[in-house]
Image (cartoon, grey):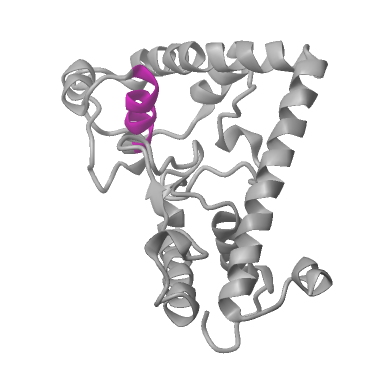
Amino acid sequence: VKQGDSVGVGLFTYPVLMAADILLYQAGKVPVGEDQRQHLELTRDIARRFNDLYAKKKKRNEKPFRDCEALIVPDGARVMSLQDGTSKMSKSAENDNSRINLLDPPNVITKKIKKCKTDNGFEGLEWDNPERPECTNLLTIYQAVSGKSKEEIGEEVKDMNWGTFKPILAEAIVAHLSPIQDRYHELMNDKPYLYSVLREGALEANMVADDTLSKARTAMGFFQFDEMDES
């Protein structure tokens, strides 16, 4: 942040709150996007600093906080906007056409891909040309949803134009999201099961959180209320 810039407090509190959520529940691997890697590094720093200060002489398995690492998919870790290949795709963007939502129906996905920003003046489609960020982005999305390798896709699209490729991409996205959407609707139509899973998950999460807080307080030398009652 440059001096004189006006920024919201969330810019500073978000990484700390994210670290608290991760450490409280003893997460070992955290699925995040590439842009969240720095937040995971901060989380590790907080955990190691706390453990060194308050639990260095304790056994490894008694340390209050667990080291975590980012779980980032090898392909498609950073997906960019459909309207700007230099900006990341975001669910909070005002323009709904800039992203593919998990529950978008096939006709909407097809429409968004048809209208997405591309380029002209080039022959064929290619990866990693700095002058073609939209091309790289759409090929990256195709790789993520098709399961094909970068080399296979490069060979497939080298002589294609956008009019040929866009329907192929839309069809691949629809096919990839279809089982996810089917499962979503299946769960939403079975509310008793859904609520039972949520209740069980909440109970288990609370047990983990309580245990973590207890270990952290003990390491810092704070008395627990139940311990005070017993004494």
Quarter of the image where one finds residue 188: top right
Residue at left offset 47%, top offset 50%: 87
Name the chief secondary structure element in magenta: helix
In magenta, the rendered stretch is: 137-146
In the depicted structure, whether residue 33 falls above or below residue 226: above
In the depicted structure, whether residue 157 falls above or below residue 12: above
Residue at left offset 35%, top offset 18%: 146
In percent of width and height, residue 140 lies at 34, 32
Is 144 within the magenta? yes
In the depicted structure, whether residue 190 falls above or below residue 7: above
In percent of width and height, residue 29 lies at 43, 46
**Is residue 39 visible in the rendered structure shown here?**
no
* Residue placed furthest toward the bottom: 3
Q: Quadrant of the C terminus?
A: bottom right
**Is residue 73 visible in the rendered structure shown here?**
yes
* Residue placed furthest toward the front: 231
